[in-house]
Image (cartoon, rainbow, N blue to C red):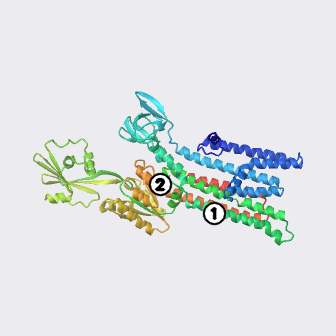
Amino acid sequence: MCDHHHHHCPTAQCGCCHHHQSENRHMLYRIAGAVILSAAAFSGLLAPSWQICLFIAAYFAAGYDIVWLALKNLLHGAWLDENALMTIATAGALAIGEYPEAVLVMILYQSGEYLQHKAVEKSKRSIASLMDIRPDSATVEENGNLVRKAPAAVAVGAVIVVKSGEKIPLDGIVISGEAAVDTSALTGESLPRVLRPGDQALSGCINTNGILRIEVNKSFGESTAAKILELVEHADARKARTEKFITRFARYYTPAVVGAAVLLAVLPPLLMPEASFSQWLQRALTFLVISCPCALVISVPLTFFAGIGGASRNGILIKGSNYLETLSRTGTVVFDKTGTLTRGVFEVSRIIPQDGVDKQELLEAAVAAENISNHPIALSIRRTMPSANPVAADGKAEEVAGMGVRLTCGNNEILAGNLKMMQAFKIAAMPQPINGTVVHVAKNQRYLGALVISDQIKDTAENAVRRLHRMGIDTVMLSGDTSQAAENVTHQLGIDTFRAGLLPGQKVAELEKLIGKSGSKSVVFVGDGINDAPVLTRADVGIAMGALGSDAAVEAADAVIMDDNPEKIAEAVKASRKTMNIVRQNIILALAVKGAFLLLGAAGLMTMWGAVFADVGVTMLAVLNALRALKA
């Protein structure tokens, strides 16, 4: 029986929107009822005793929950919150016979609460719609039939079919079909991505054309869409210092205000013979109503919520308001090189044949020699001539440790490797002062020329660094690569300093040095996350790049940039600074207006309605200001 009751408890958070909507409608009915009752009382058609009854009925219609919460908190020892302030002030008004004021105060206060609930709901809804990646159902192939199932009921290893226009419900590998998918809900990136057999398909993307058959490789709870939704929904849980400040502020502020109100009611009548107690009591109660710090309590968490929502619209997920605050104080951004600023893809960027050697001959010799190796550099050379015939069967190739490859095929001998190799075989190679990795090629002791292999820098990397510099942020690059390669990238992108040849553990040590020097500014580390998890965790804010792939990075990072674009780092800092500015504006606005009205109230120049109006008005202004953070 008890269990049954629990389901009907009006305040049980079921976590769904319908619940809030019904609660809101209930609130509207109560406000309307209170207005009608008090209008009837005001009409003057009734005997005074009936008028009082109607006012009291209207008072409880509008505010019974506030009185109830105030009493309940009183029993738990948490007696000084805004509910208590409202209750004390209105009970006082009733006690001195100001029934209309008490009722109107409740009606105005509840109307403000109602409007603010609507605003919060709207911001939550706009975040939910922007995260509209939760799939409704999956079409599963079972024994030749297509069956619609809830995504959570689909097992790993099942084959799902996604038609044009449908959302991909679960992560998996494409088995057949080819389609362009819209990843904008995940990455904020408008360009479609083409999926072919063998590619990883991510849940939450929308198939724009073609039919895909996908073998599911992650359960629904582990899938990309579910993880992102979870990140956004739990972002609230990690509170910023500013939010904690408000909780602390309320703890000291409220007793101080109640104390001041008591003194305001008691001292003037005692000290000034002509002062009337009821007049000063009324001033004291007005003072209490004005002092209610709703605007602060409501708008600050809402601003953070909106800021996180606005950033996630842009494909930047920030895992909590505390990171938003830390990001706004960024002084140094530390980059990992491969995969963050560069694509992590090696390509032959130059072919330099020796004088009198045909380019084709040089390439063929290089491809033949590198055919046995699976080293990224060998693969990049083979990609330049995909149609080349593999080595004849009688060819014999061996890797020469730390130098390169030697291929003997009939009477021919081909060497492909670094300068050391050429020197070892006494071949006069031209030393290449070139950025990147150089592979020298010789055939039968004759030098043919060299290939230059380099990692491609991302198109947006230079602009990303420039934008950070414009915001007054220092840039540092930590790389596991050679000093030469790191220096080349640093120089090309205009990064301030770099450290090269680092193992993951050394990266952490370098980062700690930077944190030690940074003072009150924060140090942000940006990595692509496969091996950067320890550094991401150690930084003030760890940002994982392109983390659609790497789970370890999503876990370790405090913020996640969904596509691979380094420019989003500046966007993230900009969004966080904007959010913090709005928070500051709201705190200053609320405290300044409060201060002015409290003085007026104490001087008796302010009625209780004016007091509530001031409070509701400031709260609404603060809430509207907070919603600006959604448009990051």
Instruction: State the image quarter where residue 430 is shown.
Output: bottom left
Q: Secondary structure at mark 2?
A: strand
Residue 75 or residue 460, whichever sits in front: 75
Eye-nearest disc, 1 or 2: 1
Q: Residues within 10 Å of mark 1 (few under 14, many from 20)?
A: some
Q: Residue furthest bottom?
A: 271
Which residue bears the numbered disc 1? 249
Instruction: State the image quarter where residue 141 is shown.
Output: top left
Q: Amino acid at mark 2?
A: Ala
Residue 210 is at least partly visible in this image: no
Q: Residue at x 80, y 63 (%)?
A: 281
Relative to 164, say whether 319 is above or below.
Answer: below
Residue 585 location in percent, x, y? 62, 61
Q: Amino acid at mark 1?
A: Phe
Q: Residue at x 84, y 50 (%)?
A: 52
Residue 133 location in percent, x, y? 50, 42
Q: Residue furthest front?
A: 1
Relative to 110, say whether 508 is above or below.
Answer: below
Task: Give the left or right position of residue 13, taking residue 498 as reference.
Answer: right
Residue 502 location in percent, x, y? 33, 61
Relative to 568, say whether 495 is above or below.
Answer: below
Q: Residue at x 74, y 46 (%)?
A: 31
- Between marks 1 and 2, how big is the CA–CA gap? 29 Å
* The label number, if any, that marks residue 539 in the structure image: none
Residue 376 is at least partly visible in this image: yes
Q: Residue at x 78, y 54 (%)?
A: 102
Residue 630 or residue 269, whichever sits in front: 269
Task: Give the left or right position of residue 556, taking residue 388 as reference.
Answer: right
Residue 298 location in percent, x, y? 63, 55
Q: Secondary structure at mark 1?
A: helix
Task: Give the left or right position of residue 459, taking residue 446 as reference.
Answer: right
Which residue bears the numbered disc 2? 559
